[in-house]
Image (spheres, helix red, strand yellow):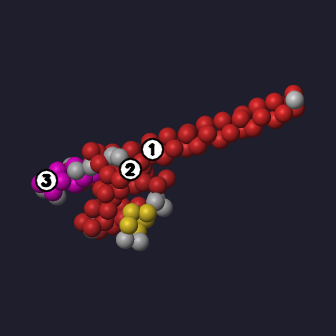
Amino acid sequence: MLKAVVAVLALVAVAAGCSSSEGEDEERLTAQRENYCTQLGAWQKARNAAATDTPESSGYDVVGAVTQDAFLAMRPLRDEPVGGGRTLAEATVAAMKNSDSEAEGRVVQYCGGVGFEALTR
């Protein structure tokens, strides 16, 4: 009887460890997605503000810095699908480097789908 109790307790401990690890992974993924969507929104705001600035103004420098931050935030999520056969990395690069409005729409939809639509335009 004691062996059965020990075996059950060991199994419960292992299962609890897995659940805890899975919960931490999910929290980390949520934090990464929130960071990406925050950076995407910052990039959109900087880009829109720079569109009204002259090329000599510092607005363009700000957009470059914010773009870099968004790319860094995207890295751990780069392989997530965003539709149209594109990954988050592909769509982010197309939106930010090539002014691809369809790609930008896909990354905005991605943020909406993961619960952070309020962080983008």
Answer few, some or many: residues within 10 Å of disc 2's Cα (few below 14, many 20 plus, some between 14 and 19).
few
Q: Residue at x 44, y 42 (%)?
A: 31
Q: Nearer the viewer, mark 1 or mark 3?
A: 1
- Residue 4's tag is none
Asked whether 98 or 23 is in front, the reply is 23
Q: CA distance from mark 2 to mark 1?
A: 8 Å
Q: Main secondary structure of the magenta part?
A: helix
The percent coordinates of residue 91 (x first, y second) are 36, 65
User: Which residue carries the number 2 mark?
Assistant: 114
Q: Residue at x 45, y 44 (%)?
A: 30
Q: Label 1 near label 2: C-beta < 8 Å?
A: yes
The percent coordinates of residue 6 (x first, y second) are 82, 31
Answer few, some or many: residues within 10 Å of disc 1's Cα (few below 14, many 20 plus, some between 14 and 19).
some
Q: Residue at x 40, y 68 (%)?
A: 86
Q: Amino acid at mark 3?
A: Asp
Q: Amino acid at mark 2?
A: Val
Residue at disc 3, secondary structure = loop
Asked whether 97 or 5 is in front, the reply is 5
User: Which residue carries the number 1 mark?
Assistant: 30
Q: Is residue 33 visible?
A: yes
Image quadrant where residue 5 sits: top right
First reached walking from the N terminus: tag 1 or tag 3 = 1
User: Which residue carries the number 3 mark?
Assistant: 53
Q: Is residue 29 magenta?
A: no
Q: Going by the picture, which residue comes out furthest to the top?
A: 2
Q: Is residue 10 left or right of residue 95?
A: right
Q: Label 3 near label 1: C-beta < 8 Å?
A: no
Q: What is the span of residues highlighted in magenta in the rendered image?
A: 39-53
Answer few, some or many: residues within 10 Å of disc 3's Cα (few below 14, many 20 plus, some between 14 and 19).
few
